[in-house]
């Protein structure tokens, strides 16, 4: 059965520990942790792992950076950070590390070389992660720009590593209302077609929630998303990522509504 999760990350107004506690109270099945600027020392990670274990919440993925674009020194730092996060995932018991993968515009200087560099970076990190039993998930997300389905498939296929998969973000597609500029969409773009293209590669789904005041997500049709996932036999996790856009309720209530909505969709679709 498809599991329901949420992404937790340290914020100025909410600690990682408090968000794990909220995930437990919401009755979620797993949690996904965005490490960001968090300490990577073993003592801290062990405390987080034990807290999740206490609440019966397996850790699904560890959210790292990626993108692998910029000056050579910048790319090298991104690669080394991704490797460090692979090591953190091993300590936490997370089987998957999220790395962003975006679209290189054709107008980019040396576009093909930039694309090749991205693929080579994924290959290097994947080769480091493989003997540790860690899978990489390419999330459709800038940098450089929000991708299409073909952009994601190209990265995965050209990386050509068994431990490179896809984390399907329902809101970060080229022309999507959830991408840049937020709140606008390209009427000629069918984001559900992109999801149909990439769903067979998905090891996790990031379920974006933007407008949930009425008890249903207004920007993304989750019955349609679930139909796509059912069509490829997906049986992984859906990770709620709340990025509220003008909701009248606070985040806690919006999260409660999102959990209820997605539980209903999972059960009925």
Image (cartoon, rainbow, N blue to C red):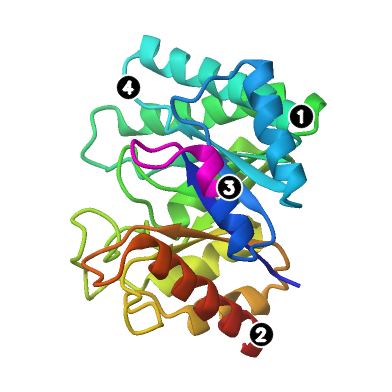
Q: Which residue is mark 1?
A: 130
Q: Which residue is mark 2?
A: 267
Please name the residue shown 53% across and 57% down the image: 168
Q: Earlier in the sequence, mark 4 or mark 1?
A: 4
Q: Residues within 10 Å of mark 1 (few under 14, many from 20)?
A: some
Q: Residue 18: say if magenta.
A: yes
Please name the residue shown 76% across and 29% down the image: 130
- Give the spatial CA distance, label 4 vs label 3: 34 Å
Estimate the x, y position of residue 194 in percent, counting from the top left: 45, 66
Quarter of the image where the C terminus is located? bottom right
Q: Residues within 10 Å of mark 4 (few under 14, many from 20)?
A: few
Q: Which residue is mark 4?
A: 70
Whether 51 is drawn above or below 216: the answer is above
Q: Which mark is residue 245?
A: none
Q: Earlier in the sequence, mark 4 or mark 3?
A: 3
Disc 2 vs disc 1: Cβ atoms closer than 8 Å?
no
Disc 3 vs disc 2: Cβ atoms closer than 8 Å?
no
Secondary element at tag 4: loop
- Give the spatial CA distance, label 2 vs label 1: 35 Å
Q: Earlier in the sequence, mark 4 or mark 2?
A: 4
Residue 188 falls in which quadrant of the image?
bottom left
Please name the residue shown 38% across and 77% down the image: 217
Please state the extent of the stretch shown in magenta in the rendering.
Answer: 10-20
Does residue 197 appear left or right of residue 127 in this picture? Answer: left
Residue that sits furthest to the top in the current view: 73
Secondary element at tag 2: helix
Q: Which residue is mark 3?
A: 20
Whether 36 is drawn above or below 52: the answer is above
Estimate the x, y position of residue 146 in percent, counting from the top left: 33, 50
Q: Residues within 10 Å of mark 2 (few under 14, many from 20)?
A: few
Please name the residue shown 36% across and 61% down the image: 251
């Amino acid at each position: 059965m498809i599991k329901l999760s949420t992404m937790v990350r340290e914020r100025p107004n909410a600690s990682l520990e408090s968000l794990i506690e909220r995930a437990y109270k919401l009755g979620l099945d797993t949690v996904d942790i965005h490490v960001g600027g968090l300490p990577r020392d073993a003592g801290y990670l062990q405390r987080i792992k034990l807290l999740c274990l206490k609440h019966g919440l397996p850790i699904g993925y560890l959210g790292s950076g990626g993108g692998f674009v910029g000056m050579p020194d910048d790319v090298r730092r991104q690669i080394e950070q991704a490797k460090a996060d692979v090591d953190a995932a091993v300590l936490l018991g997370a089987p998957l590390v999220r790395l962003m993968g975006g679209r290189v515009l054709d107008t980019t200087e040396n576009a093909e070389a930039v694309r090749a560099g991205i693929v080579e970076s994924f290959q290097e990190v994947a080769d480091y992660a493989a003997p540790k039993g860690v899978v990489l998930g390419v999330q459709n997300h800038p940098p450089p720009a929000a991708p299409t389905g073909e952009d994601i498939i190209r990265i995965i296929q050209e990386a050509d590593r068994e431990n490179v998969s896809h984390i399907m973000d329902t809101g970060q597609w080229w022309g999507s209302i959830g991408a840049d500029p937020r709140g606008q969409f390209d009427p000629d773009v069918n984001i559900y077609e992109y999801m149909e293209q990439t769903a067979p590669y998905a090891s996790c789904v990031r379920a974006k929630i933007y407008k949930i005041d009425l008890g249903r997500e207004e920007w993304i049709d989750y019955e349609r998303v679930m139909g796509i996932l059912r069509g490829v036999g997906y049986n992984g996790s859906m990770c709620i990522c709340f990025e509220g856009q003008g909701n009248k309720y606070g985040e806690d209530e919006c999260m409660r509504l999102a959990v209820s909505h997605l539980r209903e969709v999972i059960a009925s679709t």
